[in-house]
Image (tube, rainbow, N blue to C red):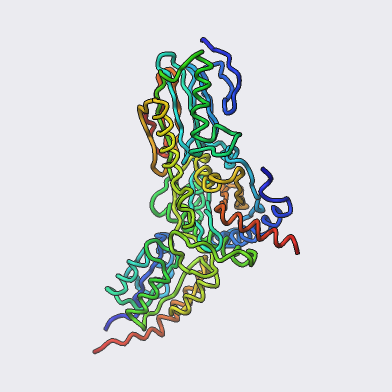
Amino acid sequence: MNQMPTMPTPGFTDLPLSTDIVSVAIGRWAVAAAPVKIRTLLGSCVGVVLYDRVVKVGGVAHIVLPDAREAVDHPGKYADTAIPGMIVDFDQRLGGNARSRLVAKLVGGARMFQVPSAKDTKAGLNIGQRNQEAIERILAELRIPILARDLGGEAGRRMTLDTASGMITIKVPGGAEYEI
Amino acid sequence: MKSNKRLLVVDDALFMRKMITGVASEAGWEVVGEAGDGSTAVALYQELRPDLVTMDLVMPVMGGLEALRQIRALDPDAKVIVVTALDQKQALMDSIRDGAIDFIVKPFERRRVLNLLVKLSGTASRSVPG
Amino acid sequence: MGKILTEVQRHLLRMIFDRGAEGASLALSKWLGRAVSLSGSEVEITRLEQAAELLGPADSLVAACSMELTGRLTGWILLVFEDRSGLALVDMLLHQPVGTTTAWGEIEQSAAKETTNIVGCAYVNALAAHLPATLTRGTAPIRQAESDGSDLVPTPPTFFHEFAGSLLEFALMEQAIELDQVLLIRSEFEAYRRESNLDWTLLFVPTRESLRELIAALAQLELH
């Protein structure tokens, strides 16, 4: 299997050397080549999947908030730093401008609890929806098409990207698995 | 002559309604209706005119205090016992002010509720014409 | 960014929430008709990323009942348990051998929810009596609380299954929107008898507004 060594970047999890499953924690991202699978567990956070169908390299970012504003650390947490950061990893791996070949899929953005306080109407009751909007805007600016979405609802999702196929398997509590 | 031991049980938990029904039956009360929220409770009260109501406080749609007020408004003689896990000052004061005849805290001692219901069945005084 | 509260404040917070846990364990013992032991309250402060593992492996499936808290303290009360423990509780309430109930039907879910109502209310009943007086009378809740005075009033409970990590992410997200570190208070319940398998976790997740107010009130207590 052809593995290109890369410099570790903030948010990047270790390069897998075998066909195991790489887990992505909240506020992190990972990029890996086929046949590795990349998995993350989502609640209101949105999982952004980027995939290069030609080279069969995929990445998953577990995004918590729409924009970093002044924050300089933990770029994986924010849509406006995680997505560009993940694309830099693709470029480094593939030695060039990967962006033109990338496609995206979005998973997560659910909402289980309402906020009890009425004061907080702006900041964020529906953080899942705000994340989705920010991510779609960023991907549109980067001209990366979104091929599929599994967003919203009230339950958590465990998603697994198969970098060999670009398909995402999703499991919800008490439900059967399905693919997008 | 109409029986004077007709009870309406109001609680959003099916499990608790069954529990209260069990105690009430042992005390000689007939449960003529059950409601899972305050709005249904008011509607059933109007329809059934029970001799007694047990009323939970924390319920969806409409809570027990509002239901208590509405029931007492449509029937100033309505007898309502509040049965709740919410044992705090405002809940107690509001229940008293809004006309509840007793305030039972969950989890309750079965014997205590049994004795209360027995006592109330003896003194229920709904006068029936004819 | 500094710690969100000092060690002394953390200790004071524990002491207050221990009163809640004590009230909850007394109520649960009475409700079950058997002694229930309770670990003291732990104040957990972590980054959101680490919080996913607080209830064990993030992708383990748990059952849970939740209530929102309204009034001068706001947040969420969660009772979390494995199916086995939850169904064991139902057996105890129905006075049948543990292991009899194997599925979450309507009455079983209702039993779990009512238990959450009783435990959650007992918890906040005790908190209401022990919170610092300087806590304000609370923000206006989205849903009108039953009483608009000083009471702490939970909403009716819901019952669901969820991945442990997702559940924590949902509950802590309101804090995580602004805070680098998130805080929750947890207590563990267990029945004395070995075969009972009653391992429940009680979590209280304050909103960030309540967290700020609690910390401010504790800081004032420290000064005296």
Q: Which residue is drawn at 67% across and 53% down?
A: C40
Counting the numbered discs, the total is 0
Q: Which of B19 and B51 is in front in this view?
A: B51
Residue A173 in the image, given as x and y percentages of width and height: 43, 39
Q: Does residue B122 appear anywhere in the picture? A: yes
Q: Which residue is drawn at 44% across and 59% down?
A: C142
Taking the image as shown, residue C60 lies to the left or right of residue C45, namely left
Residue C211 in the image, given as x and y percentages of width and height: 60, 54
Q: Is residue C19 above or below residue A125?
A: below
Work out which residue is located at the far right of the displayed protein and give it. C224
Q: Which of A59 and C67 is in front in this view?
A: A59
Quarter of the image where one finds residue C151: bottom right
Taking the image as shown, residue B91 lies to the left or right of residue A148, namely right
Q: In this view, does B104 lie above or below C165?
A: below
Looking at the rendered image, the quarter that the C terminus of chain A falls into is top left
Quarter of the image where one finds residue C222: bottom right
Q: In this view, does B3 lie above or below C166?
A: below
Q: Does residue C87 appear anywhere in the picture? A: no
Q: Residue at x 47, y 60 (%)?
A: C141
Residue B76 in the image, given as x and y percentages of width and height: 36, 83
